[in-house]
Each structure stands twice: as structure tokens, then as C-alpha cells.
Amino acid sequence: MLTSLLKKLRPSPNLASIEPLKPIIKTNIPGLESRALLNNLETVTQDFRTVRFFTDYEKSAGNFIADADGNLILDANAQSSSLPIGYNHPEFVEYLKTTYMSHSIIHRSSCALNPPEDWPEKLRDVLMPLAPEDLNELFNSCGCGTGANENALKAAFLWYYKNQNGSEPTEEQLKTTMEGKAPGVPNYVILSHTGASHGKLLGTLSASSASADAKLDFPAFNWPTAPFPKLKYPLENFIENKGIEAQALEDTRNLFKNSPNPIAGIIFEPIMNDGNYFASKWYYQQLQNIAKEFKAAIIVDETNVGFGASGKLWCHENFGIQPDIMTFSKKAQVSGYFCKKEFRPAKPYQIMNTWCGDPLRLQLLEGVYKIVKEDELISQAGEVGDYLLKELMKIQGKKGKISNIRGIGLHIGFDMPNREMAWNFYRSMLNKGVHVGVSKENVIQLRPSLIFEKKHADIFLEATAETL
Amino acid sequence: MLTSLLKKLRPSPNLASIEPLKPIIKTNIPGLESRALLNNLETVTQDFRTVRFFTDYEKSAGNFIADADGNLILDANAQSSSLPIGYNHPEFVEYLKTTYMSHSIIHRSSCALNPPEDWPEKLRDVLMPLAPEDLNELFNSCGCGTGANENALKAAFLWYYKNQNGSEPTEEQLKTTMEGKAPGVPNYVILSHTGASHGKLLGTLSASSASADAKLDFPAFNWPTAPFPKLKYPLENFIENKGIEAQALEDTRNLFKNSPNPIAGIIFEPIMNDGNYFASKWYYQQLQNIAKEFKAAIIVDETNVGFGASGKLWCHENFGIQPDIMTFSKKAQVSGYFCKKEFRPAKPYQIMNTWCGDPLRLQLLEGVYKIVKEDELISQAGEVGDYLLKELMKIQGKKGKISNIRGIGLHIGFDMPNREMAWNFYRSMLNKGVHVGVSKENVIQLRPSLIFEKKHADIFLEATAETL
């Protein structure tokens, strides 16, 4: 059934013409050239320590990333989930060639103050068609997912305050705000899932608990976390999952009930990017109900798993939930949030930055989304994902070693027995020409571009079977 | 003397050829077209409330911004201080035409993971030559000044913790970090100036106190503020300034002494962008000494006032101080911080984001800085600024109404009697074809591009004299 579905999809002949049939591996990865560049990078920046290899972006093609040593690697990580249509997509290159975009390259506009004339039209025609139902209000962040999330938290706080107290501040509020005290500075908190990761600035880091290393030594807001149900996958195969979810929901409800500080909002990813965990539709819908019951804002973080790879434009659509605020970034080229109209702050400048948008990258989004739609890449992502899951289950049956295979669309993850084996798997795959992601201690995860087809899945599956 | 200095500067004939001789005003501003666009924008985003007018970026030229109604306005605000070389600078357009930059437009690279091959070279050749003395370590933020500042605070916390406790965390630290308690979550605080504005995300907002409106209803870290000396300008004309500065320093020293929580760092702008206030060399050097005495990190925020407009590349150079960390953004095209090597975190991922840089905008910086150097725009900014100050003093002498004229280079501000008169001045100037900034209650301030020459200063001065 899956195979026949895949056949119906329109192939991208142009794209196929630039891609190699399979990875081309000439050296160990990172090779000599990447290592030499790493030594150079070390002299100027701390970031060198996270670098896997250096990239030749000109030679990269479609799903294949070219490294500095002449290797051509199937990229199932795709710039940490931020590359929507692969490398040098011919139709996108054509779009860029024929699109007039010089003014947005020559000067970045402060869209807060002096936006370009076509700004309202571009927002309406390019960005707003991507808005989930009822989220007709937009805030443009400055350029990263963390900023989008942190501004979304701000929107939740303002909305919660307004609901509790009305929007006109008293003299006492104004005064105490400047003194850092209540009532001007409220004791509101944000609830996130234990193990979640919503960003690394000081607010979002307080709503993140994926690792102690990332939080160590920084002041933090003492915000609560709700247990994320520890489930077995595939979800429908394990009847005990329902009880585990019910318990997590009960605990969450108790957190709301007993919180010493008012919970202004709950933030979660529909698939926890760090570990690729997700729960059932029922769980997310109940979670939504609990938040509503306690009048907390529902913030869905789609910065990592949004924009098509789940088989839906936004990943939360898979669960039939309706957020109050939904953030986006990465594959979407621009970052910000959509929200309900009632989340518009009472006054300007309450949520604000110099840029409030990026006209250049909005033009990139326009070209990207055109291809995503025309090539039906979102439904393809869903189908290729289903195929991958099915085939991975077969490999698990034959080889063991991997467990808890789970996924929605191309967001796929599975567990290795331990950290060491996960990193061995990562390295072995890389030297076979397949670049995967590693998260948590022992999770292998895929975050390819939306142009990842069955043939690419097969390269990954073959390398996986060999490696295991 | 000033006039003869200005004559020595090489003119930019190309630039002059695209600029009008003076503003061209056809309608009230905002005109009908801008108003109509504003109505469209209102339907999708909250940001519409901050918009002054819409811009025709193609018709904008040099120091003149074209609006949607066909007006050509001398822009002394320049995208909130973020436009280094004006609009459509002919040499920059030429640079863009002849520079190969397609790969950085086609796909944004995760420089944290898979940077482009030329990344180490570009950082070394383009960004590092801008580093202040001894600040040989770089962190690339994701794209805004707030992010740069907030990551700089993180760097200060890590460094302070390491100095107090060493860098290897104990089991207890790791455990308490996840529980949101000390010692994993330290009670460190950041000291900022009363009235400062370092950003609007939750960490930087806690170090900002420019207005209650911006802080209302948001949780905040209860961080202390040091009084900024309320001085009279020009500084050297008022002998009472020294005593006021001494008192502010004494108060600051007492804050350090008596703070219930350890002060990990002090953050300040060399010119407070919000209000254009600054103190004497002596004050900043003493402030630096106090921070050193108490082993706090010195973070200088150059996101607004850095990159040349002060007559020095970095504004703090005017005061002979040496920060531990210096942040940049806006005119610099890219954002991040330079710091001393000892501020490199012990482990990777402690300060981190997906992008860790923006190769596209780094290429823009390369072209921008080439023009800044070749046309000697930084020294020109200093000289034109001196001229402006002198001429404004003459206007003050004749007209009264304005007071406390102050400036360093092109960062110039003065007080109007009250808020209403400040905004009347703003509107009247705009309708004469000059776009200025308004900050605090009643401060008029200039933030033009570095290509602002004497002839542009004269247009501003003439309109000012007429308006008053």
C-alpha cells in the first residue's frame, strides 16, 4: 500500500539530475581538510567544539551535503532540522535568479519603524497563509527560534495578567515594576515538560530541562515542569501507555491545582525534538483541556518540528489540538509566532525588537513554500516517514540492538542501548556517507529535508542494517 | 578649524550623485499611501503601532529615505541606528554585484554544526579585525542585539562561577540545577544602570529599566541598578558634574559591598542609547575599577552605539576603558560578542544556538566595512558630530527651548521642555523632510548613517532653527 502511494508522487527530475545516486566517500569524516579548518576556527571562537565537519555548499546537491574533503554525504540531519528543500534545489535557484530582491539584501529594514512598502502584502500573501486556524495575529521575531519562544512567553504573561487584572496598570504596579516587586512584577510561571528544550536564553532556558549541562551556573526562574509520559512505541502496540499518559495528566493537573504561583501558560513541542518523544492524540487533547480549565495559555513550539516534515504543515495538526500561540523558525526561514487576536498586547513596544521581521528571508520563504506546495512535499514527507518506520521495524526484528522506533513523518527516532553505542553508530553511519542526529544520551534521530524520498530512505536503511 | 578639517575628507562623488540636494516633500508624513498600508498591516500584526511611515527602499538614496508617498526625507534616525552607509550606496551596490554570495542566500548554514569551508577565514579576516584589544574570543549570536547581550550575560555568569568554584560541577550542583535551586542555580545578579535598556527578552529586560511600560506584567530577575549620574552638558562646563559622578560611583561601590547576592557582572552602554546620556572618562574608568575590585565582569553593550558613529570604531574607546566582553549588532550587520579568552565556557553547548552566525550578513559586513575604511567615515563621523554640536549650541543661544545638548560623534541628543513639545518637534521636522528620533520623555536624538556629512548636518540645522 505504501509503495503504491509513493509511486503516485510527482518526481522532481531537476532535483534528481543534480543528486548522486548514492553517497561518495573518499576519506574518513571529518577528513584532513575539515580538521585543518577546525584548528583555524579554534583560534577565534568557542563554537568550533560543536562542529562536525566543514561544508562545501556549492557542491552540495539535494539531500547530499558535500564536505571540505570531497565527500558527498546523505544529510538526514539537514542543518539541525532547518533546511526545508535540501541543497541548491534547481527550482529554488531558478526562483532566486528571477526574483528581484536586491533592496532587502542592500539594507535590512527596521520593520518596526520603516517597513518596506510591500511589507503588509508580503505578510498577508506569504506568511499568513501558513497560520493555523484562528491564529490570525502575527509577531515577527528577530531571527531565531529561541527569540520566537521567549516572545511567545511574554505574550502569554501579558494575556494572563489582562485576564486577571484588566489591562490598565495602577500607579502601584508601575512603581513596583521598577522596584522588581509584585504586583508590577508578577510571580507567574510557565509550565514545560520535564526534558523539554525550548531555547538557551535566560527565559526559555528556565522552561528547558533537557540537560543539566546547558543550565549549570546560570540564574533561572524557578518554573515547574510537568512529567512527560514515558511511553513505548509504536504507541498503539502497548496498552500500558494509556495508564502512563493518564498518570502524567493527573500529575499535571495536580501541578496546576497546587502551584504556589499562577501558571500563565504551558509550552510544549508536539514532538519533543530532543529525543523525538511524543504521546497520543488523546494525551495532547487532555493536556489542552487541563490548560483551558486553569485558564493558562497553550503555547506550541513548532520551531524544530514545524513546517511540513511531520506530514502536516504544522506538527500539532497531527494531534487535533488548537494552540493559543504557535511559534516557528528554522525551516520556515523566518521566525516568530502566530496567535489569537486576544494575545495582541494592549500597548505597542511591550513585545518588540528593532527588526520585527526580515524581508530578505521572507522572500526566501516565498520561494521555498512554492516548491513545497507544487511538489506536494508535505504529504510525501508523511508517506516516506511511514515507509521508514515500517522498514526500521523490520531491521529491528532482524538485528535487535535498536528499540523504541518512533516517528511522525520524517521526524524519526530510535534508541541505542547506550551513549557509546549511539555515538559509534553515528560515526559508522557518517563514514558510510549518512549524516544522522544524536540526542539525549542514546537517541538516533532523523531530521532530513522535505525532499527526502523513498530512494534516500533506502540508502539510510541499507547503511543502518549494515552498521547494526 | 572644523571646516578646514572637513575639507580634507575625500568626497564620495558617486554617493553625491544619487542624493538630492535637499529633502523633497510632497505630502504630509505619513501620507495617504503610508496610512493605507498601515491599515493593511493592522489586520495581521501588532507591530503596525510602531510604524512611522512605509519606505520605498529602491528610491531611497544615501542619507535620504524615500517614503511610500514619494517624499524624500533626510534620515537622521537611520533604521534605529542600524544603517551604516545609508541607502543604496553606489560602491556597496557595486560590491554586491561583483561578490559571489549565492550559497549563503540559498541556504542558511548551521555554523555550529556544518559551517561553510570559508567560515574560519571569514571570521578571521572580516570580524576579528574589529575586535577590541585583548578581546580575541568571539561568539556569534543568532541575529539581534538582545541575543548578543543575553549571551554575554551568560558568559559572565559562567566565568564568575568558575572563578568562585572551579569549572567541574559537583553531583549536588548537577542535581540542584534540575531542581531550580542553589548551588546549581546560583543567586548571581547583573548590575545595570538605572534607566538603561539592553533588550526585551526576559534576561536582558531584567537588566533594563528605561520604562515601566516595557517591563509591566513580566516576571523578572530581581537585579540591582546603579544610579547613572544626572549630569549637565557639555560636561566640562559644569564643575558640579564631578561631585555628581563621585556620588554615583560611591553609591555603586556600596551596591557591590552590600549586595545580598554576588554581582557577577556589570553591563552598560558607553552612551546610553535611550536618552543619549554619557558621563566623563573619569567616571567610566572609576566604574571599571570598582567592577575589577569586586571581581565582576565588565560587559560593554555596543549594539546601539558601536561601529563608528562615535568617531571611534567602538564607542567605549572614547573613554579609554577595556571591557571583558563587548557586544555588537545593528550597523555591524551581524551580532555577537568579543571577549577575553578566559570567558570561553568550559564546555561546548553552554552558550549556543542553531546558527552561531550568519555567513550572508558577514559578507555584507565585509563590503560595508571596506567602504567605511576607504572613505574614512569614522573620523568623518567624529568631525561632523563636533560641527553639529557647535552649531546646535548657537541655535540654543538664539532660540532657547532646547537644552542639555550632548553628543559624541554623530550620537547627538538634546532635551525639549516636555514630551508634547518633543513630539511636536519630531512631526514638524518630519514635515520639513528631516527624520529624527525621540527617546525618553522629551529627548530628541540623532542616529544617522556614517555617511552623514556637513551638508546633511546643515539641512538638519536649518530645519531645527526654523522649527524652534
Image (cartoon, coloured by chain):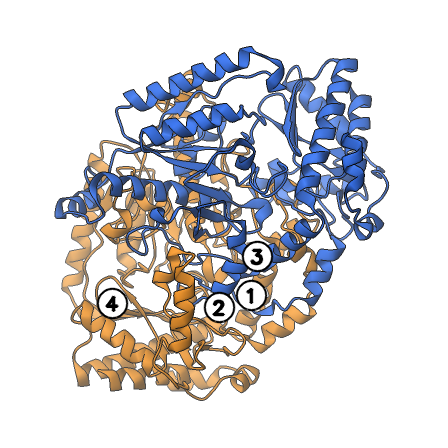
Chain colours: A blue, B orange
Query: What is the x, y in percent for residue A253?
Result: 36, 21
* Chain of the residue under label 2: A
Co-location on one chain, circles 1 and 2? yes
Q: Name the mark on residue A104.
A: 1
Q: Which is more N-terminal, label 2 or label 3?
A: 2
What amino acid does circle 1 point to? Ser
Q: Quadrant of the C terminus of chain B?
A: bottom left
Q: To which residue does mark 3 refer?
A: A361
Of residue B153 and residue B78, the one placed in the foreground of this image is B78
Q: Are marks 3 and 4 on the same chain?
A: no
Q: Position of residue B446 (x, y in %)?
A: 34, 71
x 27%, y 62%: residue: B275
* Marked residue chain, label 4: B
Given contact means CB atoms under 8 Å apart, are the residues at marks 1 and 2 in contact? Answer: yes
**Which residue sits furthest bottom?**
B21
Under mark 4, the amino acid is: Val
Answer whether labels 3 and 4 touch (C-beta < 8 Å): no
Disc ID at residue A116:
2
The circle on residue B443 is: 4
Q: Nearer the viewer, mark 3 or mark 4?
A: 3
Q: Is residue A199 visible?
A: no
* Label 1 crowd bin: few (<14), some (14–19), many (20+), radius 10 Å: some
Q: Nearer the viewer, residue A422 or A166?
A: A166
Q: Chain of mark 3?
A: A
Q: CA distance from mark 4 to mark 2?
A: 27 Å
Q: Are marks 4 and 2 on the same chain?
A: no
